[in-house]
Image (spheres, helix red, strand yellow):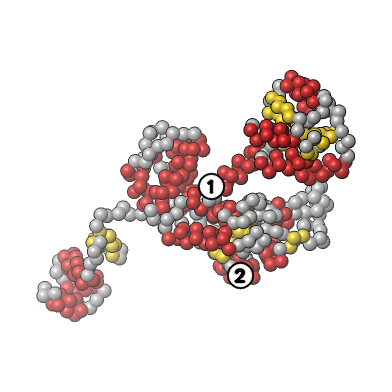
Amino acid sequence: MAHLLLIDDDAHADEVVKSLCERGHEVRWARTMADGLKLFRRDRADVVLVDTDLPDGTGREVLVQVRIEDPTTMVVLTSERGTIEEAVDAMKDGASDFVRKPLDVADLDLRVQRAMSSRRLATQLEYLKSRQARGASIAGLVGECPQMRSVFDTVIRLGQKTTRRAGPTVLIVGETGTGKGVMARALHYNSQRRDGPFVEVNCASIPENLMEAEVFGAERGAFTGAIAQHVGYVETADGGTLFLDEIGCLSLPLQAKLLTVLESRTFRRVGSSVERHADIQMAVATNMDLRAAVDRGAFREDLLHRLEIIVLKMPPLRERGSDRMRLAGHLRDEICREYGLPPRPFADDVADLVDRYQWPGNVRELRNSLEQILLLEDDPVIAARHFHLRGRMMAPKRNSATRLAVSERDIEIDIPAEGMALQTVEDALIDRTMAMCEGNVSRAARMLGVSRDQLRYRLAKRGA
């Protein structure tokens, strides 16, 4: 069932209303533009059916006003003398359909159903875009450590200083799982291009022989299997942001084409001689050392120079201090919302585990671990024993001392938090060695790597 608003002063409009109601729709009816817009503002409609000629205005005026107030509402224009030109103009203004009178209710019902499908898609798209934008808001990102605050400050500055027509290329570097894609979305949604498309491409996932056509597009017949014209990612991102992840996987010939796009904002489809304009902002990411790739001839130095204008360095999770537990709580709550699960607190031992674990998979590994626990464990509290981690753990922290392992002879010294004099460390090492050698100065000197006279001098200096 659709909620319809019919705005029409036609003598047979009441019959149309009756027939549409019989087909299960809820229909409100107004004879004038003023009354119709009043009804629309009081109670939104899924589809507005409006005649092009009204006593106090035109259907196109209604169309424009409805599109301004609710872009997801579909508008179908009807007309006694509709021409092709009038229909084309109406579609350009945003009408979902144009119907000539007299109205056939069965045909009109099909058009209403088609308009409803379009409305659902538009509503879903708006929801996804708003959800993605909320997730990419700087205010919604977790990060209080100095490295992340620096990244956030740079993103905010870029959003304030770049314009709709211009924006620098941004290189995002960091280990796998540190959130490079999240930061690319933050760049887009905190810029003046936020209403344009955000197109994400993982260069490592596309076969090399298809990469050029996928990125730049291809004309029909450009290569075997190209049975139709193909629009590439560069064109798809027009007016928005193109994010190329794993940029280090691009071949050298494609790197040259990408450099052209960055420098002149132009490109050519595969199989075409026509130069096209690329109105895009570019963000790229890598977990590679691109300088090392340049040295071994796998990456173009001129492209790297072009990419290094703005560099965002994403720190690994193990270096983010207290952010780790903040992220754990944020991700836990996010996962619970996604699956409709009740919130679960952390046990006291989770903070120590999160702090000591090296997190080789970074934020992605933390999220995956929490998702597994929340879906598979029934305990009301998340404890350290629920984490099935395969990486290295750092040594447990001591309350007031740091343990120093000296050489390979298993000599350990506890250094208090307030520090320790070097002489104290030396004295402890000499005493331990002399005890092991049962007072034999020659043997102890050999073990300590000094001469017998040097050791005697140190013992005498201590008054031993």
Task: Specify which label sits upstream in the sequence, 1 or 2.
Answer: 1
Query: Which amino acid type corresponds to the residue marked 2 in the rendered image?
Result: His
Q: Quadrant of the C terminus?
A: bottom left
Q: Which residue is mark 2?
A: 305
Who's the residue at 70% across and 54% down the image?
238
SS at mark 2 in the image = helix
Q: Which residue is mark 1?
A: 135
Picture coordinates of residue 373 (x, y %)? 44, 38
Who's the residue at 80% across and 29% down the image?
9
Res 418 → quadrant: bottom left
Determine whether, in the image, residue 174 is placed left or right of residue 69: left
The front one of 192 and 294 is 192
Picture coordinates of residue 374 (x, y %)? 45, 37
Q: Is residue 306 visible?
A: yes
Query: Which amino acid type corresponds to the residue marked 1 in the rendered image?
Result: Gly
Q: Are marks 1 and 2 in contact (CB under 8 Å)?
A: no
The front one of 131 and 271 is 131
SS at mark 1 in the image = helix
> Crowding at label 1, few (<14), some or many (≥20) Cα neighbours within 10 Å?
some
Res 54 → quadrant: top right
> Crowding at label 2, few (<14), some or many (≥20) Cα neighbours within 10 Å?
few
How far, Cα to Cα, is label 1 from label 2?
Answer: 31 Å
